[in-house]
Image (spheres, rainbow, N blue to C red):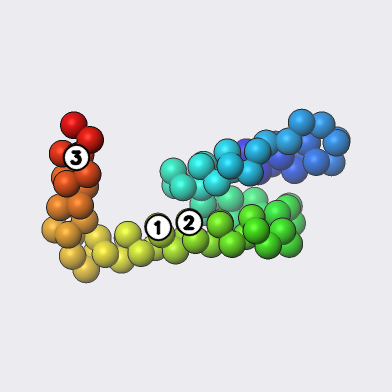
């Protein structure tokens, strides 16, 4: 997605919305987004975008750390959220 947005920026055509990029990162695409940002130098200077990107990374790292240190807590939260929805 970041590659598509970069090409669209170069061609001055329709761009991928930042909210779509962030949604893809939130769904687990943040490592690929990091690689794309660094190799294409795209979205590396825009501070609002970077702030949200790094919050998403911290969220993923925090959940992974919590999962490693206390997997029961994460499973309990997931179970609680699924019960509230259902």
Q: Are marks 3 and 2 in contact (CB under 8 Å)?
A: no
Q: CA distance from mark 3 to mark 1?
A: 22 Å
Q: Earlier in the sequence, mark 3 or mark 2?
A: 2
Q: CA distance from mark 3 to mark 2?
A: 24 Å
Q: Which residue is mark 3?
A: 84
Q: Which residue is mark 2?
A: 56
Is there any visible trace of residue 38 in the rendered image? no
Disc on res. 7: none
Mark 1 residue crowding within 10 angstroms, few (<14) / some (14–19) / many (20+): some
Q: Are marks 1 and 2 in contact (CB under 8 Å)?
A: yes
Question: Residue 60's quadrant in the figure?
Answer: bottom left
Q: Residue at x 52, y 54 (%)?
A: 31
Q: Where is 44 relative to 33, above or below?
A: below
Q: Is residue 69 left or right of residue 7?
A: left
Question: Residue 10's quadrant in the figure?
Answer: top right
Q: Position of residue 2 (x, y in %)?
A: 65, 43
Q: Which residue is mark 1?
A: 60
- Which quadrant, please, contains the N terminus? top right
Q: Residue at x 65, y 58 (%)?
A: 48
Q: Secondary structure at mark 1?
A: helix
Q: Nearer the viewer, mark 3 or mark 2?
A: 3
The front one of 12 and 84 is: 84
Q: Is residue 64 left or right of residue 69?
A: right
Q: Residue at x 16, y 45 (%)?
A: 79
Outermost residue to the right: 11
Q: Where is 79 relative to 37, above or below?
A: above
Q: Earlier in the sequence, mark 3 or mark 1?
A: 1
């Amino acid at each position: 997605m970041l590659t598509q947005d970069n090409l669209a920026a170069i061609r001055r055509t329709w761009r991928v919305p930042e909210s779509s990029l962030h949604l893809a990162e939130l769904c687990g695409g943040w490592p690929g987004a990091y690689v794309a940002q660094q190799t294409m130098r795209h979205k590396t200077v825009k501070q609002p975008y970077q702030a949200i990107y790094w919050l998403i990374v911290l969220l993923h790292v925090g959940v992974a750390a919590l999962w490693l240190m206390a997997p029961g807590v994460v499973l309990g939260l997931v179970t609680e959220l699924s019960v509230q929805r259902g």
